[in-house]
Amino acid sequence: MAPHDLRRPFKRPAISDQQRRRDLSLLRQKQNRLDAQRRARCLASSVLSFQSEPKPPSQEQSHFELELELEIEPDAEEHQGPATTYDVRQASKLRGTEARRWFAKQLMLPEWMIDVPPNLNTDWYVFARPAGKRCFVVSSNGTTVSRLRNGILLHRFPSALPNGARINNVSRSSQSYCILDCIFHEPDQTYYVIDMVCWAGFSLYECTAEFRFFWLNSKLVEVGVCDTPSTFHKYRFATVPVYNCDQEGLQTAYIGPVPYIKDGLLFYNKHAHYETGNTPLALVWKDENCSEYVIDTDSKGQVPNQQQLVLELQDDGRLATSDDPSVIFGWLNEDFIQKTGLHAGNLLRFAVNDGGLSFVDGKLEKADLQYLGQSNRARAFADSYSKVMFQYIVRHSPLKIEHLFASIGPLGDGDIASHDVEMAA
Amino acid sequence: MAMEVTQVLLNAQSVDSTVRKHAEESLRQFQEQNLSVFLLSLSGELAGEDKPVDSRKLAGLILKNALDAKEQHRKYELVQRWLALDMGVKTQIKACLLQTLSSPVHDAHSTASQVIAKVAAIELPQKQWPELIGSLLSNIHQVPAHVKQATLETLGYLCEEVSPDVVDQDQVNKILTAVVQGMNANEVNNDVRLAATRALYNALGFSHANFSNDMERDYIMRVVCEATLCPDVKIRQAAFECLVSIASTYYEKLAPYIQEIFNITAKAVREDEEPVALQAIELWSSICDEEIDILEEYGGDFTADSDVPCYYFIKQALPALVPMLLETLLKQEEDQDLDEGAWNLAMAGGTCLGLVARTVGDDIVPLVMPFIEENITKPDWRQREAATYAFGSILEGPSPDKLTSIVNVALNFMLTALTNDPNSHVKDTTAWTLGRIFEFLHGSTVETPIITPANCQQIVTVLLQSMNDAPNVAEKACGALYFLVQGYEDIGSTSPITPFFQEIVKSLLHVTDREDAGESRLRTAAYETLNEVVRCSTDETASMVLQLVPIIMTKLHQTLEAEKLSSDGREKQNELQGLLCGCLQVITQKLGASEPAKYAFMQFADQIMNLFLRVFACRSATVHEEAMLAIGAVAHATGPDFAKYMPELYKYLEMGLQNFEEYQVCAVTVGVVGDICRALDDKVLPYCDGIMTQLLKDLSSNQLHRSVKPPIFSCFGDIALAIGENFEKYLMYAMPMLQSAAELSAHTSGADDEMIEYTNLLRNGILEAYSGIFQGFKNSPKTQLLIPYAPHILQFLDSIYMEKDMDDVVMKTAIGVLGDLADTLGSNAGSLIQQSLSCKDFLNECLSSDDHLIKESAEWAKMAITRAISV
């Protein structure tokens, strides 16, 4: 029959810190459970969409009363070729060689410009390539991961990209991941975004470069990725100024000031989709004025006396470039292969001897190569034909900036192709 | 045996422990051999006027303990045991009890009245002992005052023990009539009048009908108000206790009496003895509580559906109420800050003033400011302290607009007073007031910042200095620092605290090492502040947080090395271990949330886990809970590598899951099992047999606190998601349990708010279990094992949708389950879903929800269903 205790809390906070610890733990557990659930659902749905891809369900088959509109998810996999059985979120869980192999195949790799493509001024963009490490930046499940061209993890960090950081109150579908093609520029610790492959779950693989660049510039600004770094946004992202490859654009890209160290020029065909692997629809070109790395250096940073190249040893002893189809530079005989313990798939380093490379009708006919040994283990693939050729001509008769300007023609005027009159009548 | 019972009962109270233990053993044996005879002889002893008072009293106590227990499960057993007793035996016992009420021996009739109430609490709900109340009421008219007193006491206990709905209104009327008559000024015997007043306190809960009747209510109120003027202080106090209870139970009926209530409370506060004056203040605090609740619920608007309107009693009383409360502030006791149990007029008055400020907001400021201005610089410490306390009390409630300019002026004064005031009591209140300023007027939501780059340094310096002051002052300074750093919780990447971080941490650690840190809760306050400093830190100071890890670990290690301790020493040790585990948990959770810091933190993981495992060897629920919480944070940070700790940790998980009594430990352990599942994925498999067995046992136990059951179901989901199709072997146990829980929680009709809330927690747990199971089996060849359960699950979703009382959380989980079911079962589920009664409506409702989490789940479900029915 005792009446309630009169005493009320006196000079004390109403909530105990212990209760706060409990509550915050529960909150974390709840969030983790939600994440796990989402992960489960997204993995499940992406596998499903991959399997059902060949026969998309038709509306007629559906007797469901809800009259739901079938939503086909933007799905990265569909466009990644048959070799790929993971989507990017699954792949981000891969470790070691598996991860490297997968990522190595995902980037669009520009060929080296060994001759000037036609319609450069109308069909192409040009921009100054930032010096640094080319990488894929993937945001998903509340974290952002960057991987180098060989698949090695560069950074794992929070970012303002959609789903790129675990921020309270902001929950997005894990479907909304992003994949950016970037160059990490060490001096200012910035990711320069040179292309966009996936944005908030929306795939840009099948989009033209023209659209991708437009999308890239508007979306990055929208989410504040280019803002100064903060707790939930560890690295700065920046866009690269892209120009139409006319006289003025080329001039600006070549000598215009940029906040980063230049490493050559990149040329992108406006109409080209994002294609993984080597593509002639994106090209890289360098000279001493716009790059410190025109001629390949060895591991000590010295330019070797002889040009070096890396080729892949095939089953039959042939030495191939990384192109598809590959270009064959020569053979190794079986004795040599056995003696050295090499096997198919090894990447081998060669020097170009004085005999050089001989061409007939623009095709490689003979290469005077000297075996140096196996290549660095970090290499994921052999050199491309265009790279070998670019390095070769740089040493002998380089393609100069004047040649590029010349192919564009005088300011404001088109090249030969532009003289074709469209028959409108 | 019956012959000896008197002696055994006396022996059981002997100072000689051998004699006492022997007697206790005999009693235990007696009870086990023949309960009926045992209870009969006890009631006979209690009733025996020739027996010694000590044996009678103990006999009554043992009887009482044979009828009721605190622990729910035990209580249930005792009730069943009593109900199973032979009717004749029970009748005899009850007769003895009623007879004892007439005993002139106070201890005998007073004990009997409590036992009667316990029996009534068991029997009345069973419609047994119908004559009890009638026979009690007939006692009222007996002449001896002690019989009347005992009877009124019995009625009071009875009202306390028995639920109002088992007593007829007719009987309630008779009880109230008897009680109020006993309280009346005509009653000459003060013992009777006091017993009646105390009985009314308990009977108020029975009086809803009577309080709705104007005449009856007027009568009760008149008698209660008169009793507050009785010459006997105990009766005045008891009458005020009744008024306090009336103010909260019948707030909406107070209007006609509020003026008189104010008059009598004002008189009591100013003139009466302290126990009475405290009740008078409490009455106004209770009215504040009511109005704060009402205003919070309705946001200050009158709406048509609001059950209880706000009568703004406090606002109306304000001009008289505030001066009355301010007067009390000057009646401090010299050392009240050093006495944990202190509660006096000044403390109660200040607390009430704080509640008034929360109730009326801005209006209080002009009424209090003159008092503050007049007193804050006076030479008498009482005046300075009262002014400061008044200021601190009104900081919650009024708008920042109203307070900011005042606080800007006051802040410097406070900082100076905290450094220079010669009186420790003033400094204590000053530091507390600074804490209140930071709590309510500093932070990201406050528009005009009180703390600027210009004064931040000074504030930190003064607070850190004060940490060397007397323990009670230092404790308040820690509290102020707690709220200072909390204000920078979501500051972004750069915190104004960063430049002082190292110094703050150093000072707090220094405080924890003070010889006198055990006084005034100082050590606890210092660790809690350290926790908040860590929580609110930014990446800039991550390396310094990391440096704390080895320091706290060393301290924890030292507590584990301590030699044999006294029981008091052990208790203090446990408290310290709890604080240290708590601190490590906060640090782990902080560092675990950022990738680079997490990797740096992992170097300590082995040592930390080793320490926690040693902590489990100590027997203290709080420490276990803290260590368990911390382990959850480590598991989250460690990921799959956590597997290496499992062999050693497992037994403690099992222990935690078996801890029914300290259910918080059990609940926390269930949460940590979830963390571990997510960290280990299928590597948790070897431990699942044991864990699942324990969880299933927990669910079947009626000893375990019900709040732990929903998280256990969610934990099923965590396990299933982690081990996938390996969950197969648990399906036959888990599914029926989920199914019966689902049936129980499908309908809530007639339940109160609390029950509906619990039901929704339960539903959410069940649904999370289903989600985890479906997703776990996804893409397994064994999905067909789940098909037989699908119809029931869909039916469950149907029924909770139809019930229309699920909350947003359940809605999100439920629509997710629909998607999971479709996703995992594919075409097998298609036709079932199409047959479902309400899936379509449910999905459409969720798709158009404003809650983005519901919408997200619904969109996902829509996609999964479309696939399922189109294959």
Image: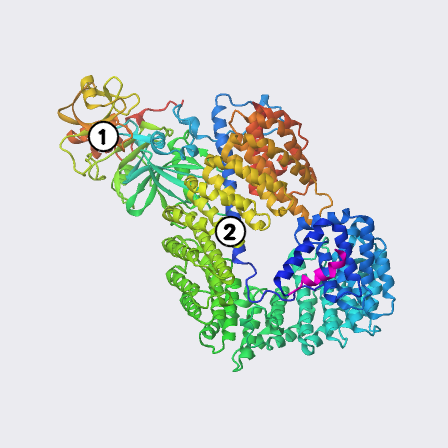
Label 1: few (<14), some (14–19) or many (≥20) C-alpha neighbours in 10 Å:
some
Residue type for callout 2 = His
Q: Which residues are magenta?
A: B1-14
Left of A283 or right of it: where is B415? right
Name the quarter where the N terminus of chain B is drawn: bottom right
Q: Chain ID for label 1?
A: A
Who's the residue at 65% across and 31% down the image?
A: B792
Looking at the image, which is closer to me, A150 or B360? A150
The residue labelled by disc 2 is: B624
Image position of A275 with respect to B223: above or below? above
Q: Secondary structure at mark 1?
A: loop
On the question of residue B688 being in view, the answer is yes
Looking at the image, which is closer to me, B158 or A124? B158
Left of B409 or right of it: where is B86? right
| Residue B22 percent coordinates (x, y) | 65, 58
On the question of residue B801 being in view, the answer is no
Q: Is residue B5 magenta?
A: yes
The residue labelled by disc 1 is: A375
Image position of B432 with respect to B835: above or below? below
Image position of B23 with respect to B628: above or below? below
Who's the residue at 73% across and 47% down the image?
A: B80
Label 2: few (<14), some (14–19) or many (≥20) C-alpha neighbours in 10 Å:
many
Who's the residue at 83% across and 70% down the image?
A: B145
